[in-house]
Image (cartoon, grey):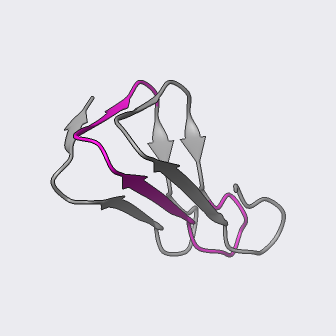
Amino acid sequence: ARSRGSSGDAGTIKFSTDGNAEVSSAIDASARATEGNGGHIDFLINGDTLTVNGSIDFSAQTGNAGKLVIDPDKATVIN
């Protein structure tokens, strides 16, 4: 969902699970274009734990940073 080139916003990455979740890689929704906003990363977790063993990037080189949404908000985030 990364944006490159001279302009453009990054996209949206969505994760959904019926239980606990573990992500073991980098998640990149950044905007590296000279114009553009960072993307959105959404986690819909129906368990109690979200474990992330990698980086999460929703930054923007020149625009606004994107958003990280974790739903429900009762989950415990590890790392």
Residue 7 location (% of width, % of height): 78, 74
Q: Quadrant of residue 25?
A: top right
Left or right of 10? Residue 68 is left
Q: Which residue range is magenta in the image?
A: 31-54
Tally the numbered discs.
0
Q: Is residue 34 on the magenta stretch?
A: yes
Residue, far front:
18
Residue 58, above or below 40: above
Nearer to the camera, 79 or 38 = 79
Left or right of 74? Residue 3 is right
Residue, far right:
5
Nearer to the camera, 79 or 45 = 45
At 42% from the left edge and 54% from the top edge, which residue is drawn?
43
Q: Is residue 48 on the magenta stretch?
A: yes
Q: Quadrant of residue 29?
A: bottom right
Residue 32 location (% of width, % of height): 68, 57
Left or right of 74? Residue 34 is right
Residue 62 location (% of width, % of height): 57, 70
At 20% from the left edge and 59% from the top edge, which residue is drawn?
73
Nearer to the camera, 13 or 63 = 13
Q: Quadrant of the C terminus?
A: top left
Residue 68 location (% of width, % of height): 39, 60
